[in-house]
Amino acid sequence: MDNEESLEWDRMDFVEGRDGEMAAQAFAEQGIGQYESAIREADSGGNQYGAAYRESLLASLRVYRQYLGQKDSSR
């Protein structure tokens, strides 16, 4: 796990501890939508936020998907 992923796991732990599991799941789902959109927009020549932060966004997406996958498998 790289440092960006580790920091994102820390953030997920913080959100879950502060707001609860359902809020953390919503946070991850919202992040997936926003970050995928930013990357798509950058790839199509639009807003370049997704290009500038691509590796960080991809690390966050990996964590969000793993987090949601863990929650789905525990049900």
Image (cartoon, rainbow, N blue to C red):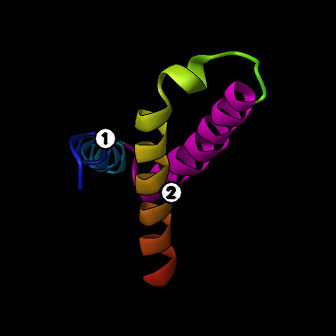
Magenta residues, as a range?
A: 19-43
Q: How crowded is mark 1: few (under 14 residues within 10 Å), some or many (20 or more)?
A: few
Distance (Cα) linking label 2 and label 1: 15 Å
Main SS of the magenta part reads helix
x, y percent for residue 73: 47, 83
Label placed on residue 28: none
Tag 1 secondary structure? helix
Label placed on residue 11: 1
Q: How crowded is mark 2: few (under 14 residues within 10 Å), some or many (20 or more)?
A: few
Residue sitting at x 42%, y 62%: 67
Residue 41 inside the magenta-drawn segment: yes
Of the residues under marks 2 and 1, which one precedes in the sequence?
Answer: 1
9 or 41: which is nearer to us? 41
67 or 26: which is nearer to us? 67
Q: Which amino acid does label 2 sit on?
A: Met
x, y percent for residue 52: 50, 20
Q: What residue type is labelled 1?
A: Arg
Read off the residue under disc 2: 22
x, y percent for residue 60: 43, 44
**Vertical comparison of 17 with 40: above or below:** below
Q: Quadrant of residue 56?
A: top left
